[in-house]
Amino acid sequence: MPTTSYAHFSDVPESAWRWPSFSPAEIACRGTGAIKINTQAMDMLQTLRNRLGKPLIVRSAYRSPAHNRAVGGAPASRHMLGTAFDIAMSNHDPDTFAAAARDVGFLGFGTYPRSGFMHIDLGPARSWGEPFPARATSFEAEVPPAREVLAESRTLKGSGAAGVATVGAAGIEVAQDVLAETQSAILPLVPYLDTLRWVFITVALFGIAVAIHARIDDWKRGQR
């Protein structure tokens, strides 16, 4: 397992870095910035990334001995060898991820559902930790767009009532004009149509009031 160490990840020459999905800063020690590159482990990590087809969020990779002690790591942690990675599960299904990691050659697995990551390393073969809870989907639930939330709001209901009533009032007015000009035989109905038009106007005003009230109420509930 050839390894190369640098005092800081900024010291890594571009010619020595061949893993396009990751940067030296992601693999370096979070406490000191030092980095130890195990080419076999990095090749396997890149292969895993290519197989899964989505980003691997590295929570921890190489750890210096001092940083490993500071975070409570195991005394013989593979992180100090540059052969272990803690990967966030926020954008992965844990079962699918673990199966793919085994396929590319990782042997050690630690599951940390409360912290949301999985530890993988080159071995020996072993596993520990609690299982991740079953998920309905492979990803975390997404927040619905504001437009979809608004569609469920009473705002649209009030606005819809106002719109229908406004159209109805306008239609009655047109009907009055048509009847007055072309249907003299039923002119006695025109006054009733005028009353109906005012009914529609009243409904429209009520709908607007409901929409305004609902809009304010939705805003208070954080629905906007």
Image (tube, rainbow, N blue to C red):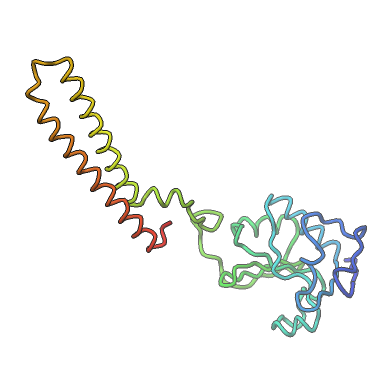
Quarter of the image that includes the N terminus:
bottom right
User: Which residue corresponds to the image point at 51% horizontal and 64% vertical from the top-left?
Assistant: 133
Quarter of the image that includes the C terminus:
bottom left
Looking at the image, is 151 positioned above or below residue 34? above
User: Which residue corresponds to the image point at 27% horizontal and 37% vertical from the top-left?
Assistant: 166
Q: Is residue 48 left or right of residue 194?
A: right
Looking at the image, is 48 positioned above or below residue 72? above
Residue in front for this viewpoint, 144 or 131? 144
Q: Residue 58: which quarter of the image?
A: bottom right
Q: Position of residue 186 (x, y in %)?
A: 9, 19
Q: Position of residue 15 (x, y in %)?
A: 93, 58
User: Which residue corresponds to the image point at 6% horizontal and 23% vertical from the top-left?
Assistant: 188
Q: Is residue 49 left or right of residue 154?
A: right
Q: Is residue 54 left or right of residue 161?
A: right
**Residue at far left of view:** 188
Q: Position of residue 85 (x, y in %)?
A: 73, 67
Q: Position of residue 142 (x, y in %)?
A: 51, 55
Residue in front for this viewpoint, 116 or 189? 189
